[in-house]
Amino acid sequence: MPELSVVIVATDNEQRAVMQVLVDGTSVARTVHTCASFPVAASDPVTRRVRTANPDVTLVDIPADNPQLALRAIELLHQEMPDGAIFAIGNLNQPQVIVNAMRAGAREFIERPTNTTDLLEAFVRLTTAQRRGKQEGIRGKVFSVINAKGGNGATTVAVNLALALQSAYGQTALVDLAPLGHAALHMNLKPVFNVADATRNLHRMDASLLESFMTRHSGGLQLLAGTNVPAAVDPSTAEFVRLFDMLVTHYRYVVVDASSRFDAASRLIASLSETVLLVACSDVASLWSAARVQQYLGETGSRERVRLVLNRFRKVPGFSEADAEAAVGAKVLWRIPNQYFAISGAIDRGTPVMDQRTSEIARCFAGLAQELTRNDAEVKRAAWSLFKSV
Ligand SMILES: Nc1ncnc2c1ncn2[C@@H]1O[C@H](COP(=O)(O)OP(=O)(O)OP(=O)(O)O)[C@@H](O)[C@H]1O
Ligand SMILES: [Mg+2]
């Protein structure tokens, strides 16, 4: 493994010194420069010095009592050096800081106090990802599906949306994070591993290990199966963020079935998602619940990402789509018709409706997949090149 050059940015003198000793102790990386203040602008001398050092990795220490300047520094350094990696070092008890650091551009969040093992593992992951990235270079999108109320159809939507994305664009994964995973049953799959195995092995995760935890559906969709023991999977924020970071470097689209999971994990997944599909029916209890879920996700900053999917949709006299939007506080993205026999039969047989290509309901899910990917340049390019090759 080639030696990585590292810059350390930490305002606390002791922390800075400790980090330097730890980095140099990994023997795969070497500190080339340290900074005692956070850069605040591109023209800042600190930014200039880091840029000149041009490190493979910049370690940014986030003080627990005042994270803002450190988060701004991560964003700035990421903009200035898009090819360099940033590792944030901070407190694991602050989920919002972790999410903000990852959104600002950090690729790892390492617990403080740090140790040589955690740093070494992060350095190895970086080198492996860089090697792989040179071959693949994807950064996928996450779409999460959550119920307004138990049984509203999140799993049906997640499974069929994932199959539609796989069939149109390939390279799609479905991650089952429901409190009790049903996605494998919907697809008649018998997973050997599940999401708990993946999070337990994150420290040694690479492309082939991730693949070995997935269960392949006949059309190519890869399922990271859910737990078969109620509520057994409760990984830490950093583990979740890392798992999704792994997934989006391997798959173009990652669909998450959160079903009726209303906890810190579902909020975190919402904040990592491009769009959150809130599945509701048009009855009063479901719309009332949808408004509560929307508010719950909104408290952690995901309000703008939430879209309503009206399931078992049928026109009700005197009740319009605008009424549903006003009641919930989110725009309607899609409507799925009420087709009990087709859908419940498909679940019982383990052959999703998306596999019955010509049906109205399959076309409906294909349309949803198209709507969600409408603005994707990569997809447009893929469609264009497919078009050209015919
Ligand atoms: N569009 C639809 N029309 C008619 N019935 C539907 C529709 N979508 C789902 N259903 C029915 O609703 C039931 C629940 O579906 P599904 O398992 O997808 O829901 P869920 O919301 O994920 O459930 P849970 O809360 O247990 O996770 C199923 O029996 C299915 O047949
Ligand atoms: Mg479900």
Image: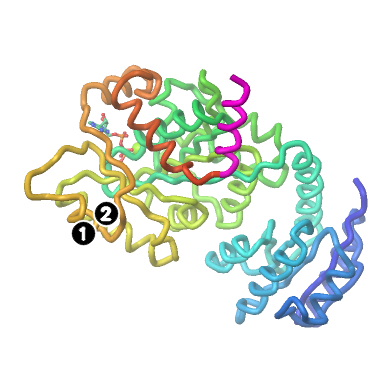
- Look at label 1 and name its amino acid: Ala
For the residues bearing labels 1 and 2, Cβ distance under 8 angstroms = yes
- The span shown in magenta is 377-390
The vertical placement of 8 against 208, above or below, is below
Q: Position of residue 333 (x, y in %)?
A: 33, 47
Q: Position of residue 374 (x, y in %)?
A: 47, 43
Which one is nearer the viewer's eye here, 267 or 52?
52
| Figure check: 281 above or below 291 | above
Badge nearest the viewer, 1 or 2: 1
Secondary-structure class at tag 1: helix
Asked if residue 241 lies left or right of residue 323, the reply is: right
Tell me which label, 1 or 2, sits earlier in the chain. Answer: 2
Q: Position of residue 306 (x, y in %)?
A: 38, 55
The residue tagged 1 is 327
Q: Would you say 361 lies left or right of 212 here?
A: left
Residue drawn at 76 percent across, 53 percent down: 122
Label 1 to label 2: alpha-carbon separation: 9 Å
Task: Kindly indicate the quadrant of the structure image that contains residue 358.
Answer: top left
For label 2, the residue is: 290
Magenta stretch: dominant secondary structure: helix
